[in-house]
Each structure stands twice: as structure tokens, then as C-alpha cells.
């Protein structure tokens, strides 16, 4: 099944998180709402109403770090009763507890979307800003793999890791994950993240090598928010479909709606624009748009 389509709903349960990733799109909300979760009653009622109204087939349950939510298994069971395929988005740390991973799978989690931002503790924890997060993430992935869970590994491309993308790809595949995502950083209007944005022309050669390394090992690759024109033969891996129908705290819903903007000077003549979009508005503000051209 595709990661997301028009029949996918995003259920955002709150902002608490046990990592401190500087590039996180919800970092400002994480600070302001760090102790708050959407109530279980609201989440279940809103989920049922959305499925009834729109006929969703899949739900992506996310946070913050959603595995910290005390009622997560109940949410997953409710989603399964509604006939939904369920994905849990996570940094993987709580899944280092094999019993907890089993509990989530028994409750209804079909697949896990796990953040992997480096191929070593030094790099991964430089980005998560949380000591010990690499070892717990790795144990979590190994537990899920051994339990037969569906797995997607996601790497956010930032200045600190873009040159290591081929090594990160090989590391992830070596853990037995066969579905890799690479998402270019989307700061959504937060200037403090400007130094984390690498030039796309600098990142492109490493991203292409990562794609080839993963696919040579039998894995599939999806790229998000990276210009198709800079990926050459690997440009077909770009897929920017996202479930913008969401059950979420209004602050996040409005923030994403207003901040998720893309620009491209070749919009009119580029045959790939409809699925590519070009560059994020923040990228254009920091680096300009001269690096892209019609493929």
C-alpha cells in the first residue's frame, strides 16, 4: 500500500516528545504544548466521524512522539474496529521494549514509520539532541523486524547528514528495512532552522547514491520535497503526496496549512511540477531558486 493517498487520515495526538530534534516542524508547538495530549474521548469521536464522512482506509497515528501517549493501544484498537489500516509514526525508542512493541502490534498497528537520521550514534544523536536515542531506535527497529511488523525508515535530509546519505541507506537496509524514505527538511517558516537547510545541488549527488545503494540491495525508496530536476534517472522516486486531512490540535493544523508552501520559477513549463512542486518557500528565502531547471 502507498504511504498515503486521498483515503489516508492523519491523527495527531499531541506534542510531547522524548527527542529534541532541531529540525522538527512541530518544535515550537512542542515547547508550548509539551504536557498536553488530545483527549482519548476527542480522538476516538473525531476518528469515527472522519471515517464515516470520508470513507478513509488508512490512518497515520502521530505526535510529537506518539508512543508516549498512555492511551495509544486503545486508539489503535478503535482504528482497527473502524476497518482502518494503521501506521504508527515514531522515533522508535519505546519500541526497544519488545513487550511494548508486541502490545502495539496486538492492538492493531500494521506498520511503523521510524525516524533514522544517522548511521551512527554520533550523527543520529547530534540531530535528535538526545543521548542514548540511537541505541534505543536501533533496538526498536530490530524488535519490529523480528516481530514481522511492516517497516518504513525515514531520514530527514539536513546540513549535518546530507553527505552521509549513502551510508545511512546501507545502514538501514542492513537492519532489514526494505522501505526507505528521504524527506528534505521543511522548516515551515521558522528562521532558526535556516542553517540546517543544505543546498539541493550539494545534497543531490549523495541522495542519488543513497537511492542506488538501497535499490541495489532490493529496497524501495521514496523521496519527499526534493526537486525532480536534480535527481536525474532517480527523479521518479519523488512522491510528495501527504494526508492533509487530519485530526489535530488546531494550532498544528493551521500551522501546516499556512507554512507548507512551495515555489518554482519553472512552474509553467515544467512537466513534473504537479508532482514535484519545486522548492520550499523557506529554501527559496535562504538559497534562492537558481539551482532548479525543467528536467
Image: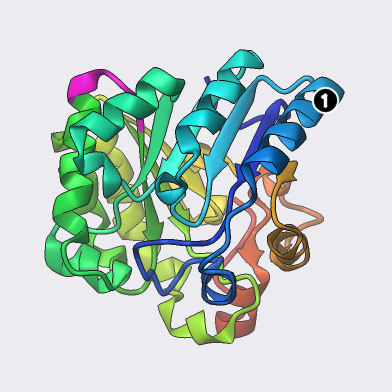
Q: Which range is magenta?
A: 146-151
What x and y, as percent, mark residue 43? Answer: 67, 40
> Is residue 243 at all visible to an observer of this figure?
no
| Residue furthest right as drawn | 53
The residue under the point 41% across, 74% down is 22
Closest to the observer: 193 or 59? 59
Confirm whether the magenta stretch covers residue 148: yes
Above-or-below relation of 8 to 16:
above
- Please say whether residue 60 is one of the residues in the magenta stretch: no
Say which residue label 1 marks: 54
Task: Identify the image quadrant of residue 292.
Answer: bottom right
| Vertical arrangement, residue 246 with respect to residue 290, above or below | above
- As drawn, is 228 to the left or to the right of 255? left
* Residue 23 or residue 241, whichever sits in front: 23
Residue drawn at x 55%, y 50% is 228
Give whichever of 252, 41 is nearer the camera: 41
- Residue at the location (22% across, 67% down)? 125
Q: Is residue 286 above or below residue 115?
A: below
The x, y position of residue 114, in whole percent, is 35, 43
* Element class at badge 1: helix
Looking at the picture, does residue 85 appear above or below residue 184? above
| Residue 240 pos. (x, y %) | 61, 44
| Among the 4 quarters of the image, the one containing residue 191 | bottom right
Amino acid at each position: 500500500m502507498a504511504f498515503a493517498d486521498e483515503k489516508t487520515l492523519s491523527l495527531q495526538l499531541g506534542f510531547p516528545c522524548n527527542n529534541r530534534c532541531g529540525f522538527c516542524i512541530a518544535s515550537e508547538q512542542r515547547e508550548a504544548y509539551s504536557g498536553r495530549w488530545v483527549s482519548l474521548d476527542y480522538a476516538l469521536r473525531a476518528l469515527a466521524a472522519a471515517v464515516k464522512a470520508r470513507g478513509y482506509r488508512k490512518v497515520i497515528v502521530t505526535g510529537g512522539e506518539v508512543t508516549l501517549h498512555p492511551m495509544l493501544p486503545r486508539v489503535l484498537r478503535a482504528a482497527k474496529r473502524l476497518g482502518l489500516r494503521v501506521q504508527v509514526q515514531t522515533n522508535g525508542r519505546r519500541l526497544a521494549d519488545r513487550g511494548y512493541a508486541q502490545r502495539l502490534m496486538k492492538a492493531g498497528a500494521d506498520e511503523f514509520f521510524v525516524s533514522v537520521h544517522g548511521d551512527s550514534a554520533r550523527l543520529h544523536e547530534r540531530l535528535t539532541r538526545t543521548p542514548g536515542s540511537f541505541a534505543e531506535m536501533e533496538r526498536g527497529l530490530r524488535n519490529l523486524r523480528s516481530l514481522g511488523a511492516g517497516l518504513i525508515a525515514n531520514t530527514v535530509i539536513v546540513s549535518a547528514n546530507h553527505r552521509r546519505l549513502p551510508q545511512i541507506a546501507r545502514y538501514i537496509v542492513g537492519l532489514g528495512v526494505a522501505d526507505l524514505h528521504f524527506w528534505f527538511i521543511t522548516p515551515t517558516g521558522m528562521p532558526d532552522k535556516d542553517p540546517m537547510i543544505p543546498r539541493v545541488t550539494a545534497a543531490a549527488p549523495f541522495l542519488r547514491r543513497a537511492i542506488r545503494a538501497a535499490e541495489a540491495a532490493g529496497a524501495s525508496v521514496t523521496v519527499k520535497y526534493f526537486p525532480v530536476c536534480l535527481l536525474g534517472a532517480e527523479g521518479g522516486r519523488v512522491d510528495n503526496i501527504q494526508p492533509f486531512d487530519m485530526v489535530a490540535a488546531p494550532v498544528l493544523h493551521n500551522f501546516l496549512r499556512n507554512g507548507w508552501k512551495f515555489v518554482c520559477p519553472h512552474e509553467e513549463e515544467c512537466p513534473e511540477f504537479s508532482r514535484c512542486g519545486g522548492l520550499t518557500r523557506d529554501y527559496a528565502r535562504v538559497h534562492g531558486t537558481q539551482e532548479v531547471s525543467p528536467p
